[in-house]
Amino acid sequence: MSIEIGEVISVKGTNIIIELYEESNKETLFYNGEKFNGVSIQEFVLIRRGFKDIVARVQGEYLDERFKDEENNCYIRKVELSPIGYFQFDEFFEGIKHLPMIRDVAYLMSDTQVKSIFGKTDDSFIVGETLIEEIPVSLPWSKLFNTHMGVFGNTGSGKSNTLTNLYTTLFRNKRDSFGGKSHFIIIDFNGEYTNDQLIAKNEGKKVYELDTRNNDGDKFPLTNEIFWDEELFGILFKATENTQKPFFKACCIRSK
């Protein structure tokens, strides 16, 4: 069961505004033995649209002074929401695929429903927890490490710590799965991973100390299969697409 808290009065792009009922001002509510957090910044709200429950996060709130509830002597409270996904048959799907319509009813989300958004599945691992709800946040192994990935942030924001956590967890838990099949190359300009970070040296880690100023540094080994690659030559020689790349492709085919 869910607790009704208001209804949608505006949808502009992905910006949703709902008008709240008076009883929605409580910080915490309990209903049928379940705990519900009240409506506040960064909390989650459900909006029912047909057979789907749209999940939205509270981004802001205000009192609309143009309208006043004379009976209770208070202004109408409104909140702005941003959708993050939806529930269908009790399964959460991330992404803005569905949007509500005017007069759709909004509900509080129970702790159980909120945990299911960040919940751990069989093919995932825990990387931390949310600041407000203190709910474990998990990421899927296959989707994270089987695609391109970037970590962005200001200096000192924790990029290196994030990568260290991700790959240390990967090597600790999945090393037997890709051992002998995959190689990982870490290009480390600042020497942050040259000791026992990520994986210990006695567990198969090799550090090459490269030096572009003289010939005293290590040399990074390349096998014939890796060296004779048209894409590699195209990058090294900044090859043109229609003239030089076909030549490098022919060279690589003959060398193999």
Image (tube, rainbow, N blue to C red):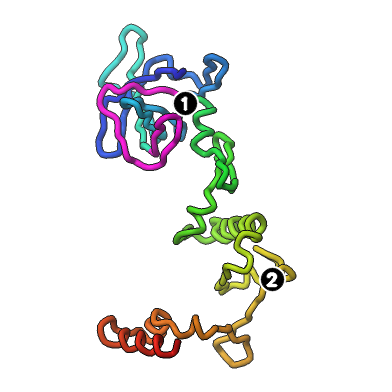
Of labels 2 and 1, earlier in sequence is 1
Rendered residue at 55%/73% (across/down): 187
Q: Is residue 88 above or below residue 28?
A: below
Q: Hey, which residue is sitting farthest top in the picture?
A: 71
Three-letter code for the amino acid on which mark 2 is drawn: Gly
Visible residue check, residue 62: no
Rendered residue at 36%/37% (across/down): 82
Residue 130 position, x and y percent, is 55, 40
Is 200 displayed left or right of 170 in the figure?
right
Question: Which SS class for mark 2?
Answer: loop
Quadrant hosting residue 48: top left
Three-letter code for the amino acid on which mark 1 is drawn: Met
Decide which of 159, 221 is in the foreground and name it: 221
Q: Is residue 204 above or below residue 19?
A: below
Is 56 displayed left or right of 31 in the figure?
left
* Mark 2 crowdedness (10 Å alpha carbons): few <14, some 14-19, many ≥20: few
Visible residue check, residue 168: yes
Q: Is residue 185 above or below residue 51?
A: below
Rendered residue at 31%/12% (across/down): 69
Magenta region = 84-109
Q: Tell whether position 83 is magenta.
A: no
**Quarter of the image where the C terminus is located:** bottom left
Residue 235 position, x and y percent, is 39, 81
- Which label sits on residue 224? none
Q: Hey, which residue is sitting farthest bottom in the picture?
A: 215
Q: Which residue is mark 2?
A: 204
Q: Tell whether position 91 is magenta.
A: yes
Q: Hey, which residue is sitting farthest right in the picture?
A: 202
For the residues labelled 2 and 1, the Cα–Cα distance comes to 47 Å
- Which label sits on residue 109? 1
